[in-house]
Image (spheres, grey):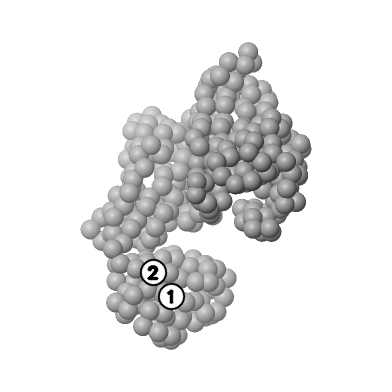
Amino acid sequence: MKVKFYPQLLAVLLISQSAFTQNLIVNPGGESPATSGWTIVSKGSDCYGSSDWHIQGNQNGFPAAHGGNYFFFSGCGSVNGEIYQDINVSSYAADIDASNLNFNFSGYIQVYNQSPADGAQMKVEYFNASNALLASYNTGITRNVGVWTQYLSSITANPGTRRVRITLRSYSYNGSSVDAYFDDIVLEAVKLLPIQLISFSTSLDRSNDVVANWKTATERNNDRFELQRSKDGNTWETIATVKGSGTTNAIQSYSAKDNFPIDGLSYYRLAQFDLDGKMSVSKVNMVKTTSANARLIAYPNPVKTILTLEGDAETLSDISIFGTSGQNVNASIQKSVASPTRLELNVSVLPKGIYYIRANGKSTTFYKQ
């Protein structure tokens, strides 16, 4: 098993989850025509049931929406499409000008499977009150064929930022429709806390466990850290809890371990809790683990009664199942061999919660409903 690191995503500051705003974008998923919240610069003709830069998914050959029922689609013809939305962020001026605010952007793109494929692009631009450009994020022209792909950006707002412009662009390279799709566009303002994180890294030990190490420059009323992991970047589980150092201006070093890392792409972050219960979280660090052999797959997940495991015969020949506190629950689970590469587990007797499966060097998790 190997781990791929993304050092550009290492956290340098903790940010307050309690300070996350609601999504600042109006009509973020194309559920209403783009004339609601967005300004249309250019579009093709309405077709296949589309209207004003949106269309219902899962019909007439279009994919299902990433979220909801509709997504952004600029229409038919050879006209490149463009829409934008301006967000006034002057209400955050005090925190922006004190370099105490992050803007987190997220959006999904997909294009139709054809050759050559059409193109899709998202831009985020940050302006001051005089309309001078201070910073920007640009996905470039993408061609993610047949799958919704998420793009993320997080920046600390430059002092003076007062307006953010989100732009969606579609490019016609083939056919009668401009098959570039967008969905679930998010912009959130996140207030930074004075707790500074010098470094946050992950590595594998000899047992193929993921070890997280981090250092703080300052701490204020810090009760504890929780190392958290997610498979999708949205739902998080706590892997380990580490006691904080209260209030200090001295450099502090910490570590925690994930004994059951997920095979494939996963996300790690630190959750920090003040003595008064307030919570903050670090920026996200992505880790990709790969294996030379077939993956260990568990489904359905969440599960109520029967959990199916799939993998090669060697992998399934020796499995161990643990609760979050490390207790082995193998003895309470009835196992049934469906085939050399499929094993069925009756987990109905297990209490609700997260469980870990380890099998000959591979691991996965499941949630018991």
Mark sitting earlier along the chain (1/2): 2
Decide if residue 327 is in sight here: no
Which secondary structure lies at badge 1?
strand
Q: Amino acid at mark 1?
A: Leu
Q: CA distance from mark 1 to mark 2?
A: 7 Å
Q: Which residue in the protein does label 1 denote?
A: 309
Residue placed most toward the observer, 17 or 62: 62
Which secondary structure lies at badge 2?
loop
Residue located 45% across and 43% down the image: 284
Badge 1: residue crowd in 10 Å (few <14, some 14–19, many ≥20): many
Residue 313, position as x, y percentages in the image: 32, 79
- Residue lying farthest left? 206
Residue placed most toward the observer, 120 or 6: 120
- Residue lying farthest top? 130
Decide if residue 269 is in sight here: yes
Q: Which residue in the protein does label 2 denote?
A: 296
Residue 146, position as x, y percentages in the image: 53, 54
Residue located 55% across and 68% down the image: 302
Contact, mark 1 vs mark 2 (Cβ under 8 Å): yes
Q: Amino acid at mark 2?
A: Leu
